[in-house]
Amino acid sequence: MADQLAIDFGQLGQTAEQLRSITSGLSSTAEMSGGIAHLTGHQLLGDAVLFFAARWNIQRADMIDAVDVLRASMDKIITNFTDTDESLAKQFNAAASADGGGDRRPWRS
């Protein structure tokens, strides 16, 4: 029995899309934090909310950067696996044709 490497391209794509969604969600919360402070009805509490929002903006930006790195890495992984799979399929088909064998399609076609 031959060893096989099976790559779930659907799962990889879904993970990349989830990372995009996380970035989008974190980005959209920046707009909400400033508007909440005046709703507290108390100056000191409103100031505390603004202070928290300012610190959260810094943390959120760092989180967005980290998630963007993961997303870019996932996109590169998908591209590299796809390119490798297509290249290996072509090589297999060339060798099989020379031997009179069958056709091998890339896993992701």
Image: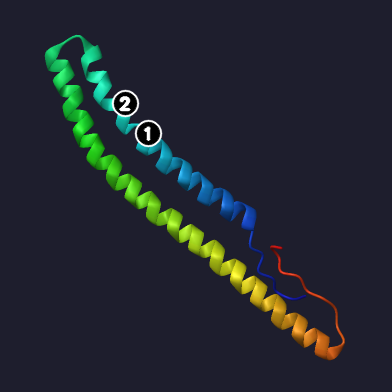
Find residue 28 and report its image quarter.
Answer: top left
Q: Amino acid at mark 1?
A: Ser
The foreground one among 13 and 5 is: 13
- x%, y% of residue 54? 19, 33
Label annotation for residue 28: 1
Find residue 51 and report its image quarter.
Answer: top left
| Horizontal relation, residue 66 to residue 48: left or right | right
Quadrant of the rendering where the C terminus is positioned: bottom right
Q: Quick one: which residue is furthest to the top in this view?
A: 41
Q: Secondary structure at mark 1?
A: helix
Give the CA distance from mark 2 to mark 1: 8 Å
Q: Quick one: which residue is furthest to the left in this view?
A: 44
| Horizontal relation, residue 49 to residue 28: left or right | left
Q: Secondary structure at mark 2?
A: helix
2 and 1 marks in contact (CB < 8 Å):
yes
Q: Residue at x 70, y 74 (%)?
A: 3
In the picture shown, does residue 72 fall above or below 19? below
User: Residue tagged by mark 2?
Assistant: 32
